[in-house]
Image (spheres, helix red, strand yellow):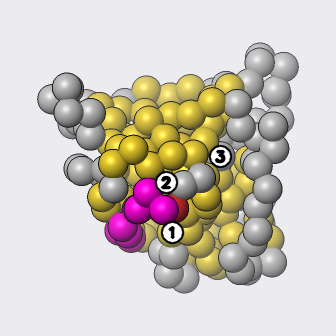
Amino acid sequence: MKVPFRPQGGSRHIDQLQINGCRWLGDFHAEPSDHMAGQTFHINHSGELESISVYCEMVHREGRIKMSLHQFDEKQHDWGPELGTVELDIKKINDPTWVDFDLGKVKLDSNSRYGFRLHTNDALVALGEAVWGNDKKELTGEEWIAKGNEKGGHYFRYFSLVYSVGMN
């Protein structure tokens, strides 16, 4: 299924709008560590970031979510320093919906790879996700997940969060 998207701003978008599952983000009370999630993506053209929107299928527990944007080294699976960060409150009234993270005006370079990471200490939300078959050669990013302070986390080529990157 394709999730309808209403652009917040910016004239160009890099997006993945297909959904067939969800990825849990946040605090599971029965586990000692938080679940984190993220997504890498490739930029074909230079521009200024307007916002990154993530599809939230359900808010099980309200709280604050932090998004950080990084340059990303695909070969080393290494997150560069934060290029921007923002925190916002997520409410049950917000689901299901697009959650817009305004990271400010960040310059993104053409033919570069970036990624965003999501973390919360108190909320528990289901993010929209797509699981692809191995025939999706055009996918240019990887979904990332980690628990707590796990070193590096795990990357999945045939999984993707439902997201949109708006640029000018």
Q: Earlier in the sequence, mark 1 or mark 2?
A: 1
Magenta range: 86-93
Task: Work out which residue is located at the far top of the displayed protein and give it.
Answer: 134
* Residue 127 in the image: above or below residue 29: below
Question: What distance separates the C-alpha of mark 1 from that of mark 2?
Answer: 11 Å
> For the residue marked with disc 2, what is the amino acid?
Phe
Q: Is residue 2 visible in the rendered structure shown here?
A: yes
Q: Secondary structure at mark 2?
A: strand
Q: Earlier in the sequence, mark 2 or mark 3?
A: 2
Q: Which residue is mark 2?
A: 116
Q: Are marks 1 and 2 in contact (CB under 8 Å)?
A: yes
Q: Which residue is mark 3?
A: 162
Question: Which residue is at 33% across, 48% downward?
Answer: 61
In percent of width and height, residue 83 lies at 43, 68
In percent of width and height, residue 44 lies at 77, 59
Q: Secondary structure at mark 3?
A: loop
Question: Which residue is at 76% across, 40% downward?
Answer: 18
Q: How many numbered tags mark residues here? A: 3
Question: Which residue is at 51% across, 75% downward?
Answer: 102
* Residue 65 in the image: above or below residue 106: above
Q: Which residue is mark 1?
A: 101
- Is 84 displayed left or right of 17 in the figure? left
Q: Are marks 2 and 3 in contact (CB under 8 Å)?
A: no
Quadrant where the C terminus is found in the figure: bottom right
Question: Which quarter of the picture shows residue 48?
Answer: bottom right
Q: Is residue 78 visible in the rendered structure shown here?
A: no
